[in-house]
Amino acid sequence: RVWTLPRQVLAGLTAFLLALTVVVMSTSARRTSRKARVVDAMEEGAGSGEWILWEDDLVRVTSPIVRAHNSGPDGGHLLVHPLLRPQQRPYLETFEMAPALRHRIIDACAAAGRALLTLPQNQGGMINIMEMGNWVTRSADGVYGPKHVHYHVLGRARNATLQTFGEAMRYPWYRDRLKFNPQPLLTPLELTELAWKIHQFMTANV
């Protein structure tokens, strides 16, 4: 007779191993860099609906908890957010930013893309990096507001089923945006591996 563990037990073991792995990585990160730190991949960004994978004084790399633009099997979806000071406008265009911030954004986008390319599903694939922020300018009453600058880093897997490789990314109209929720997302183990890879690539550029 073959014995199998209940799904709840397997989920609990996976969560425990993930937490243990992140603690070990975080300790190593603190030893190797005073600025950069690997944040627990299961730590939810405050009000952002995103897992925080990595951050320093200038940028933060995250992964959506819900409504990603790309599923995990299709290549994954990460975001890069510049950490602007409170007195700075959150809707600065990239060319308006200070050179140090622009350069760090480029480093973070490149690190996120390189990390995504290490996932098995992205072998032989490619990366798309996009600054959009179109939906965030809209409101329910149709009033247009300020853009909030952020950057999307998307893996493009050759075997993708929704966001087909070799085609442009496909998005719905604004009114249908809440129905757009590619599944499944990147797994906790994939997020932990990505967090460590991003840390390695970013600290190599310090």
Image (cartoon, helix red, strand yellow):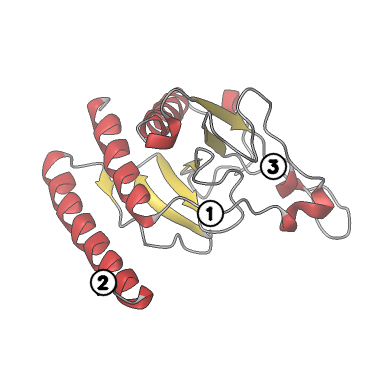
Which numbered disc flags the more N-terminal residue, 1 or 3?
3
- Residue 43: where, in percent of width, then height? 37, 62
Query: Which residue is rendered at x = 22% and y = 62% of the image?
Result: 17
Q: Quadrant of the C terminus?
A: top left
Q: Position of residue 153 (x, y in %)?
A: 52, 34
Spatial distance from mark 2 to mark 3, Cα to Cα? 56 Å
**Mark linked to residue 37:** none
Measure the alpha-carbon separation of dots 1 and 3: 28 Å
Which circle marks residue 2 in the picture? 2
The residue pinned by badge 1 equals 184
- In depth, the one of 168 and 59 nearer the eye is 168
Q: Amino acid at mark 3?
A: Lys
From the top left corner, tell me how far across and down residue 74 is, in percent. 54, 39
Q: Earlier in the sequence, mark 2 or mark 1?
A: 2
Residue 36: give x, y in percent of width and height: 26, 42
Towards the viewer: 57 or 88: 57
Amino acid at circle 1? Pro
Going by the picture, which residue comes out furthest to the front?
1
Report whether 4 appears left or right of 70. left
- Which quarter of the rendering shows the N terminus? bottom left
